[in-house]
Amino acid sequence: MDFATQFPETKVLQKAYQLRKKSKWFYFISGLLITGTIAWFFFKNHQEKQAKKAENAMYQAVYYFEQNDWKKALHGDDIYSGFLAIVQQFSHTKAANLAHFYIGNIYLYQQEQEKALTHFLQFKTKDPLLHPRTLSLIADIYCDQKKYKKAIIHYQKAADLYPNTDLNVMYLFKLALAYEATQQYTVAVQTLKKITQKYPKSIYYAEAKKHKYRLKTYLK
């Protein structure tokens, strides 16, 4: 006869111990879940407050931008923050994301291309106008820096995003010029041919036709 049989109360004690052990884990896990829920609530509440503050700051910064007051748009005034402060103070908000686009445009206007490029690359959007526009601006900078391969990639992305639009023709035309700069004349002609065949009413039609015939001389 074993010990547990001789003393059945030990089985009760063992079960009580196991239940107690499980209960500890249960309360521990429950505590973690409750703590996590509370932390998430405060995080979301903080995010919402930050987003509201960022939006309020953006109104004045955008106003200065529209007035071509680049200094105040970037750095703010005695009351309101500028775009640069917004991206630092409210980095995870939609307003801060959009501020990168405005900053990039200001730096581009001031011919500070590296700074402009840094902010354009940080700007994330799926807007049907801003998305291809930003890709094109990035490509423009790469072209000026003679980084034509990178420019081609970004022009192509911009052109592929929303085909059969007026802006699409502009991106195709720029793409063709980038191909020409890398002496890829065949692809450049093919790109220009898309414009002359698909967009005969485009303002780029005449230029595309002229460049296409000029480039064909390199293929003979």
Image: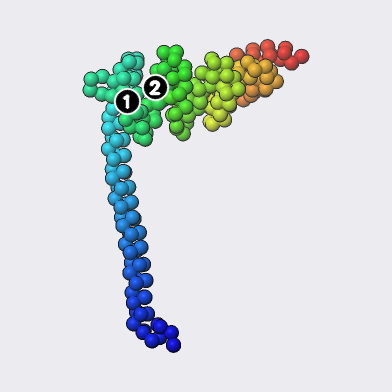
Question: Does the rendering let one see residue 189?
Answer: no
**Which x, y percent locates residue 74?**
34, 20
Which quarter of the image is occupied by the N terminus? bottom left
Q: In the rendered view, would you say 128 is above or below 33? A: above
Residue closest to the eye, 38 or 111:
38
84 versus 7 height, above or below = above
Q: Position of residue 203 (x, y in %)?
A: 55, 17
Quarter of the figure with residue 171: top right
Displayed quadrant of residue 172: top right
Label 2: few (<14), some (14–19) or many (≥20) C-alpha neighbours in 10 Å:
many
Q: Which residue is mark 1?
A: 85
Inspect the image, locate mark 1, and give the three-letter code of the amino acid beneath it: Ala
- Residue 110 is situated, as x and y percent measured from the top left of the image, at 41, 13
The quadrant of the rendering that contains the C terminus is top right
Of the residues under marks 2 and 1, which one precedes in the sequence?
1
Residue at left 41%, top 17%? 107
Which colouring convention does the figure follow? rainbow
For mark 1, give the secondary structure: helix
Three-letter amino acid code at the position of disc 2 = Ile
Judge by depth and name the residue closer to the eye, 218 or 41. Answer: 41
| Other-residue count near label 1 (Cα within 10 Å), few / some / many at <14 / 14–19 / ≥20 | some
Viewer-proximal residue among 123 and 126? 123
Residue at numbered disc 2: 103
* Residue 6 figure quarter: bottom left
Picture layout, residue 151 above or below residue 161: above
Of tags 2 and 1, which is closer to the observer? 1
Residue 27 visible, this angle: yes
Is residue 155 toward the left or the right of residue 110 in the image? right
Distance from disc 2 to disc 1, alpha carbons, whole Å, reads: 11 Å
Residue drawn at point x = 72 percent, y = 13 percent: 218
